Image: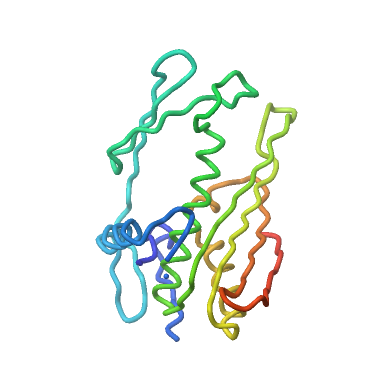
């Protein structure tokens, strides 16, 4: 899968020359992301370059009672959302807070897949958990911490170091994470699909 062009800030990026993804991303949907991303990117001599700015648009409106709808031009189905139950919303619906964390998780997942594809790095599975903490501050309620926990499953033990390096690179390139000013922690984990050996590393995001 191609690396999303908007991650590159208009500058070429070198990719290592030496993929089934979770976060509920099926192979069919991953290929759809690939076809779409290829239209946005130009690939020249191992470099990815951005051609023009990309614009994204979402419209949200309050439908009735305590629920709303959000719709994007890129998806046919609207998302029903509500405020968190702690703030008077309904149970069982997506909240803006959930959608924000979901954006971080899905952005990281697609970014890593793109890096793995162009680095010819094969892996068995990737699950990304994102957790956020909200507290009351002087200016009101705010996210005070976001933790990103990618759990990568590989089949070759010798690839553990390279796997951690690609996980860290994906975090630096993830557009949504870079758009947030809240403090973030990054806790990557690599495990073998058949053996019991496991390598993990917890790093602060700079």
Tell me if 140 is positioned left or right of 113 in this view: right
Q: Quadrant of residue 195?
A: bottom right
Please name the colour scheme applied to the rendered image. rainbow
Quarter of the rendering occupied by the C terminus: bottom right
Quarter of the rendering occupied by the N terminus: bottom left
Measuring from the top left, give residue 194's x and y in whole percent.
57, 77
Q: Quadrant of residue 84?
A: top right
Residue located at (33% from left, 58% from top): 33
Residue located at (49% from left, 46% from top): 103
Work out whether residue 196 or residue 154 is closer to the camera in this orientation and state it.
196
Q: Residue furthest top?
A: 65
Measuring from the top left, give residue 118's x and y in whole percent.
39, 75
Measuring from the top left, give residue 196's x and y in whole percent.
66, 75
Tell me if 26 is positioned left or right of 87 in this view: left
Label count reads: 0
Measuring from the top left, give residue 39's x and y in whole percent.
25, 61
Tell me if 80 is positioned left or right of 149 in this view: left
Q: Quadrant of residue 56?
A: top left
Q: Is residue 197 above or below residue 23?
A: below
């Amino acid at each position: 899968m191609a690396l999303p062009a908007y991650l590159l800030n208009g500058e070429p990026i070198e990719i290592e020359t030496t993929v089934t993804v979770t976060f509920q991303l099926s192979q069919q949907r991953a290929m759809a992301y690939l076809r779409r991303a290829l239209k946005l990117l130009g690939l020249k001599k191992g470099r990815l370059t951005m051609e023009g700015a990309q614009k994204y648009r979402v419209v949200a409106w309050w439908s009735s009672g305590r629920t709303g709808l959000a719709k994007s031009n890129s998806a046919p189905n609207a998302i029903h959302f509500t405020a968190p139950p702690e703030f008077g919303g309904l149970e069982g619906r997506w909240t803006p807070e959930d959608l924000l964390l979901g954006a971080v998780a899905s952005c990281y997942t697609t970014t890593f897949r793109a890096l793995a594809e162009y680095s010819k790095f094969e892996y068995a599975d990737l699950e990304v958990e994102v957790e956020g903490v909200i507290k009351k501050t002087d200016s009101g309620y705010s996210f005070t911490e976001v933790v990103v926990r990618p759990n990568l499953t590989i089949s070759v033990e010798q690839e553990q170091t390279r796997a951690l390096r690609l996980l860290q690179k994906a975090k630096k390139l993830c557009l949504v994470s870079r758009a947030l000013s809240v403090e973030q922690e990054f806790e990557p984990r690599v495990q073998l699909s058949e053996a019991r050996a496991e390598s993990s590393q917890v790093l602060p995001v700079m």
